[in-house]
Structures are given as C-alpha cells and as structure tokens.
Amino acid sequence: MNNYINALREHNLKATPQRLAIADILHTKGHIAIEPLYEVMLKKFSSISLATIYKNINLMVANSFIQEVKIPHAKSLYELTKDAHSHLLCQKCGEVTDITVDLNSVISSASQKSQFKIEKLDLVLSGLCKNCQ
C-alpha cells in the first residue's frame, strides 16, 4: 500500500482510502470498467457513490496515474499507467491482455503516407485467445 501512497503523491494526488483501493483493484484486475469497479468498491465502502468513482477515475486519468483503454464497441476499461503497450481483445470471452510490440514502424509509415503528425497510438488487436480458439 505504501507504494501506492508514494505513486499517487508523485502524480500530485492525495492518497485517499478510495484512491488507494482503486489502485489496488486495478493492480489485481489489470483492466476493469467503471461498473465492475464500482461493485468491488461498494464492498469496501458501503456508502460510496458512482459519482465519486467517476470523479476519482477522471482525476487519476488526468494526472496520468491510470489510463483509459478504449475498446471498440464497448465501454472503456481502466488500468494502472505502464510503459507503452497495446492490447489484445478476445472477441469471444472479452478478455483484454497487454502486449508489447514495436509500433515505431507503424507510426513512421502512417506519418509518411498521410503527412499527419501522430502524437499518440492506441492499438487494440482483436481475435480469439488461446482458451477460446
């Protein structure tokens, strides 16, 4: 828990019990949407509101402590901020996992072809996980 306290402070965030719990849940779950996060938080904080969850998530994203994972045609997921990576999405079971791939050539090629200055790349690869194949 002390690691989260220091990490939150490094991102200019107060280490409130709710934020510490969110960090712990994200560490345990990996990727989670707001509603399932709220369900878990209710078990720890019986009077917490969904608005409080959104407020904390938005502030933690704005301060780069966590990041939003935008999944096509689904609700966003959230994860602790990590080194640059992409995501694999199983189209059958919905599992989302991290994958590290070198995207520099994709960015370079797309920039050259489009003359567009790419500042951020979010890549979600869809298919079937090992268990669902």
Image: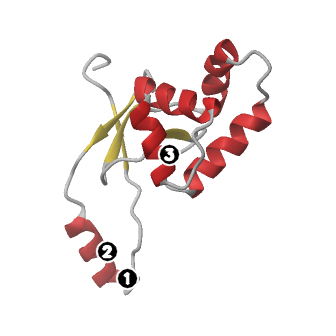
Rendered-image quadrant of the C terminus: top left
| Residue 42 falls left or right of residue 87 | right
Q: Disc 1 versus disc 2: distance between alpha carbons?
A: 6 Å
The answer to whether the residue labelled 3 contacts the one labelled 1, judged by CB atoms less than 8 Å apart, is no
From the viewer's side, name the closer residue of 13 and 114.
Answer: 13
Determine the residue positioned at 58% across, 48% down: 60
From the viewer's side, name the closer residue of 98 and 4.
Answer: 4
**First-in-chain label (3 vs 2):** 3
Q: Give the mark toward the camera: 3 or 2.
A: 3
Q: Position of residue 12 (x, y in %)?
A: 54, 55
Query: Amino acid under label 3?
Result: Leu
Q: Residue furthest top?
A: 43
> Label 2: few (<14), some or many (≥20) within 10 Å?
some
| Residue 44 falls left or right of residue 129 | right
Residue 67 visible, this orientation: no
Q: Where 116 falls versus 65 (above or below)? A: below
- Place residue 28 in its image quadrant: top left
Q: Give the mark toward the camera: 3 or 1.
A: 3
Q: Disc 3 versus disc 2: distance between alpha carbons?
A: 35 Å
Of the numbered discs in the image, which one, if any, rests on residue 114?
1
Query: Amino acid under label 1?
Result: Ser
> Label 1: few (<14), some or many (≥20) within 10 Å?
few
Q: Position of residue 18 (x, y in %)?
A: 64, 31
The answer to whether the residue labelled 1 contacts the one labelled 2, judged by CB atoms less than 8 Å apart, is yes
Q: Where 35 falls versus 116 (above or below)? A: above
Q: Where 81 falls versus 112 (above or below)? A: above
The residue pinned by badge 3 equals 8
**First-in-chain label (3 vs 1):** 3
- Place residue 115 in its image quadrant: bottom left
